[in-house]
Image (tube, rainbow, N blue to C red):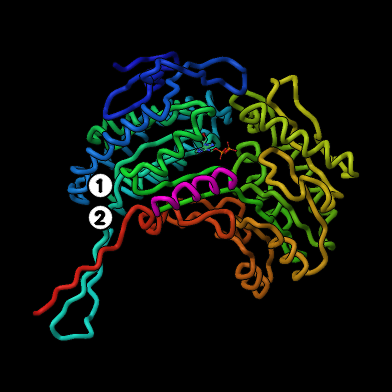
Amino acid sequence: SKMFVRHGSLVFNKAFVNGSFIDADSRKQFNVVNPATGEVITPVPDMDVSDVEKTITLAHDAFKEWKNTTAKERGIVLRKWYNLLVEHQEELARIITSEAGKPYKESLGEVAYGNSFIDWFAEESRRINGEVIPSPVKSKRIVLIKQPIGVVGLITPWNFPHAMITRKAGAALAAGCTCVVKPAEDTPLTALALAALADQAGLPKGVLNVITCDRSNAPAVGKLLCESPLTAGISFTGSTAVGKILYQQCASGVKKVAFELGGNAPFIVFNSATIEKAVEGAIACKFRNSGQTCVSANRIFVQDKVFSQFVGALKEAMDKCLKIGKTEDCNVGPLINEAQMNKVSSLVDDAVSKGAKVLLGGKKAQSHGSLFYEPTLLTDVTPDMLCAKEEIFGPIAVCYKFKTEDEVIAAANDVRVGLAGYFYSNDIGQIWRVAEQLEVGMVGVNEGIISTAEAAFGGVKESGIGREGSHHGIDEFTDVKYICFGNL
Ligand code: ADP
C-alpha cells in the first residue's frame, strides 16, 4: 500500500494508521505545497473525525501490548529508529526543505536535532525509575512506580516538521504510550517519512499513527483528540490561541497536557557585553528559519552606551551573512504561507507608518518568489506599534534602546508570555540577577542557540505547561502510582 511520489522512497501521499498507509474514508485530499516555488508536491488524505476516531481506537488497542513491553525493548526499537533516521538524514532534510521552505543546510541541522531526541529517549526509556520511600509506620512499605498514561495526541506545527514530532514521540514511546500524531497541514510529509522509518525499525502497528488533515478539519480533529475517552493526554506545540482552546477541551476529561506555545523572546545586550559575540548570537537567534521559531529573538534591547555600535555591527553582519533565496548556499528562505507573509509585512508597514526607522530591508523580496521577505532591521519602535507587542515570526530584527538593568527587566517581563530569553553581559553579578529575574522558561547567557535534547525545553506564563527533552520530558507521558504494602 506504500505510494512513492517524486523525490524518492520516503515521500508518501497517504496517512499512516495501524502500520499501513491509507486514504481517508471520504477519499478527500488536500495539497502539500512547496512555499519556495508554489508547486504542489503531492496531495495527502484530508481525514475527518470519523477517520481519527478509528485511529484512536487502534492506538488504544496497541497500547494494551505496548505498555507491557520492557523499557529495554522500547529502547532497542527507538535505537533502531534513530539509526534509520541517521541513514536517511539527507532525504529527510530534502523533504523538510520542499514542504517548509527551510534552507537545505538548516534542514540538515533540524534533522540532526530532531534525531537526537530519539537517541536521547532510547536511553531515557531505561531510566524511568520509581522510588522506595521510608515509611512512617513499621508495618508498611511505600513504593512509587511510573506508568505510561495511554494514548496521546501529538499536535505539531510547521516550523520544525521533524523535531517537534520526535521531541514528543520519543518521550511518549519511551514511556510506553501510543501516539496519534496530527502534523501541521503545511508539513505532513516529514511526519509520514518519520512514521515509515519507525515502522521499518520494528515499532509495532498502531503504536505511532500519523493522521493528515487540512486546516478546516483541524479544530474538530483536535477536539476529538482532547475529548475522546480513549485518549489520556495531549502534547501540543503551536500558537497560544490554539493552546488555550485545547486546554479548555482537555478540561472536560481532566486530560494531561503538555503545551509549548508562543514566545516573545527578549534579547538584551548590556554595556559590558562582548559586542561581536552578541551580534553573532543575534544573527543566529533572530534569522534561523527566517525568524519563524518560537524562541527567536523578538525584541532586541540594547543598552545606551553600546546601542549605535551594536546596531551598526548588526546591520553590517546582516548584510554580510544573510543570503535570501532558494538555492543551497542561501540561509534565508521563504515564509511558510501567505497568512504569515501578510502578518509580517503588515507588522513592518504598521511600524513604518508610525515612525519606525528602516535600516535594512523593509519589504517583500518578490524576485525570489511571492513568500520571500527581506531581512529587515528596525529602530525607533514605540510601544504603540504592533511589532512591539506581537510575536513577529519573520526575518525582522527590532532594536530598542534602554538605560538601566531594572528598566530592561521590567520591559522584558511586560508580556503575557515567557518562553526563551537571552542576554549578553560580562558582569557576573548582573548575569545571576538577570538570569533569575527574567520571566521565561529558558535563558541563554552570552548564547543565542540553546535547544538540545539533554536540557528541558518549555515556557512559563502563557508560553506553556510542561517540559520537553531532558528526563523531565518523560513526566508528561507517565503517571506516578503509589503502592502501599501493608500489614507486614
Ligand atoms: P501556527 O500559527 O504555527 O500555524 P497553530 O497553533 O495555528 O500555529 O497550529 C499548530 C497546529 O495546531 C497545527 O497542526 C494546526 O493544524 C493545529 N490546529 C490549528 N487549529 C487547531 C484547533 N482548533 N484544534 C486543534 N489543532 C489545531
| Residue 82, quarter of picture | top left
x%, y% of residue 400? 80, 54
Q: Are marks 1 and 2 in contact (CB under 8 Å)?
A: yes
Query: Circle 2 — which element?
Result: helix
Q: Amino acid at mark 1?
A: Gly
x%, y% of residue 451? 51, 51
x%, y% of residue 354? 89, 43
The answer to whether residue 482 is above or below residue 351 is below
Residue marked by disc 1: 75
| Residue stretch in magenta | 240-254
Q: Is residue 300 left or right of residue 475?
A: right
Residue nearest the viewer, comparing 301 with 327: 301
Earlier residue among tags 1 and 2: 1
The mark found on residue 126 in the picture is 2
Residue nearest the viewer, comparing 215 with 121: 215
Q: Give the dominant element type of the magenta stretch: helix, strand or loop.
A: helix
| Residue 366, quarter of picture | top right
Image quarter in which the N terminus is found = top left
Q: Amino acid at mark 2?
A: Arg
